[in-house]
Amino acid sequence: MPLRALLIRDIRIALRIGGGALTGVLFFLAVVTLIPFALGPDLALLRRIGPAILWLGALLASLLTLDRLFADDQADGSLDLLLTGRTPLELVVVTKAFAHWLTTGLPLVIAAPVLGIMLNLEPDALVIVMLTLLAGTPALTFIGVIGAALAATLRRGGLLLPILILPLTVPVLIFGVSAANATLTGPMPFGTPFAILCALTLFSMVIGPFAAATTLRQGAE
Amino acid sequence: MNLGQHASFIVAAYVIAIAVVGALVIWVIADSRTQKRMLADLESRGARRAGEREP
Amino acid sequence: MALIDLANPTRFLTLATRVLPWLVGLTLALFAVGLYLTFFVAPDDYQQGAVVKIMFIHVPNAWLSMFVWGVMCVAALGTLVWRHPLADVAAKAAAPIGAAFTFLALATGSLWGRPMWGTYWVWDARLTSVLVLFLMYLGIIALWRTVEDPSRAARAAAILTLVGAINIPIIKFSVDWWNTLHQPASVFRAGGSAIDKSILVPLLVMAVAFTLLFLTLHVAAMRNEILRRRIRTLRLLQARMTNAGARA
């Protein structure tokens, strides 16, 4: 199974020294720690905007390590092997994105409740935030692979990635935060925004790999 | 023609529109002059295209 | 002249030179008619008074902000499917013009909002989605300016344009949804009643005038871009010849 080998390889690379697995979580921690310094330690306020802070932090953190998703493979030539290989490039992209999510997205989901306690969130709000992040962070990764592919095919493209990708993540942010806020504030039920969030994730899983694979093929010529 | 109590906003909107469109027009014309001058400069120094092919 | 003839950049240059004066004249004439209708014929709104005159530049710009993205999408298909150099040129020339019109839609909308809403900016659904569109235009322009090789930049920008086009309806939908969730009580709505003919006709004339303005600027900018690429090719050829001469 070439895809399984690729998955294991990518996870190993992310976890070893110099890999990006911990960077995202540390950045998440730093962002969430900084926000009370800007807003003041008002626990009532922090509890009200806590889900939004966690979502914003997770969004920025998952973008942070994305530019290396294909750039490292291109630098050491393994991207050319993947391009010429017999496995469909779209599936390769899905596998690499999944490995990236496992090593950077999933740690964010696990770290979120810990940071949520520091933001004075109620236990049931913690569960809800975790659930929305679990459903929403794959969408961020799969939208991000398009930017990662662009960054790999263009020299100096890495700096551009957040500018190109952030506008596309607006829907994910809206429905993620709405669903996470449902228990806290709204008359809005949890189900509707959560269902749309899941739909966005599934949709991005289709669009992202195709667009990224096209980008990589076009860039290789 | 009476622009009413909010005349300044109407005037400001039209001024901004004229300024932005004017900037676009000036940019296009200036760019056209620069490119034509550079092309003429290059051609006078004997540079020539190979056939009709574009890069 | 058949469409296939346009495909040749040199043919396009001669055609552009022939067509541009007509386009400029037509644009100016339509603007004269449109502005006359706006200021001397169209009545003031009974609720908004003369402020409604801002609509005659706001709505055409908002329409163009989406129309130009559509033009860029067609060009993107031309780039990816037919590998057409003229499509690359069309996409690149359209981006800054589209960004300028989108900026105008935002600026006039904000100036329209100040007397109506009491503040320059509200996170109204339409304004917010146009703002996201503006950010996407800036991203495309940044992409064009980052990459040195034009055809490589064209393919990257084409993919991003198409991905953006797929996402624009989703963004619009989610911003609408988000807005109804946070809707403040007193927001003015333009779509409440059918638009009267005395307002609709000047609006349509202005919309056509602005579209013609875009076409004029686009053709002129495409001509500039073709010349720029020709200069780039000449320089590369010259450098290669100088190198070969030095080695011989």
Image (tube, coloured by chain):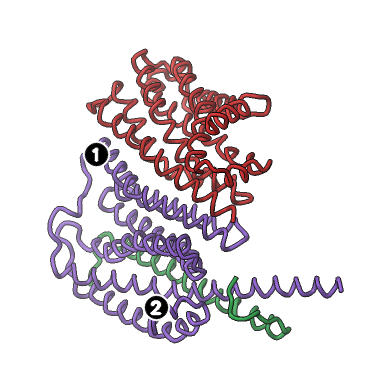
Chain colours: A red, B green, C purple
Is residue C85 left or right of C64 when viewed as pictured?
right
On the rendered image, what quadrant is the C terminus of chain A found in? bottom right
Within-10-Å neighbours for mark 1: few <14, some 14–19, many 20+: few
What residue is rendered at 20% in x and 57% in y?
C48
Q: Is residue C50 visible?
A: yes
Disc 2 element:
helix
C77 vs A170: above or below: below
Specify the amino acid type for callout 1: Thr
Front-most of residues A88 and C54? A88
The residue tagged 2 is C3
| Residues indicated by labels 2 and 1 sit on the same polypeptide chain | yes
**Label 2 vs 1, first from the N-terminus:** 2
What residue is rendered at 44% in x and 86% in y?
C18
Q: CA distance from mark 2 to mark 1?
A: 46 Å
**Callout 1: residue from which chain?**
C
Within-10-Å neighbours for mark 2: few <14, some 14–19, many 20+: few
Specify the amino acid type for callout 2: Leu
B11 vs A57: above or below: below
> Where is residue C49 shown, x and y percent of the image?
20, 61
What residue is rendered at 81% in x and 72% in y?
C244
Classify residue C122 by image quadrant.
top left
Front-most of residues C69 and A119? C69
| Number of residue marks | 2
The residue tagged 1 is C180
**Callout 2: residue from which chain?**
C
C61 vs A172: above or below: below
C175 vs C142: above or below: above
Is residue A179 left or right of A25 when viewed as pictured?
left
Classify residue C39 by image quadrant.
bottom left
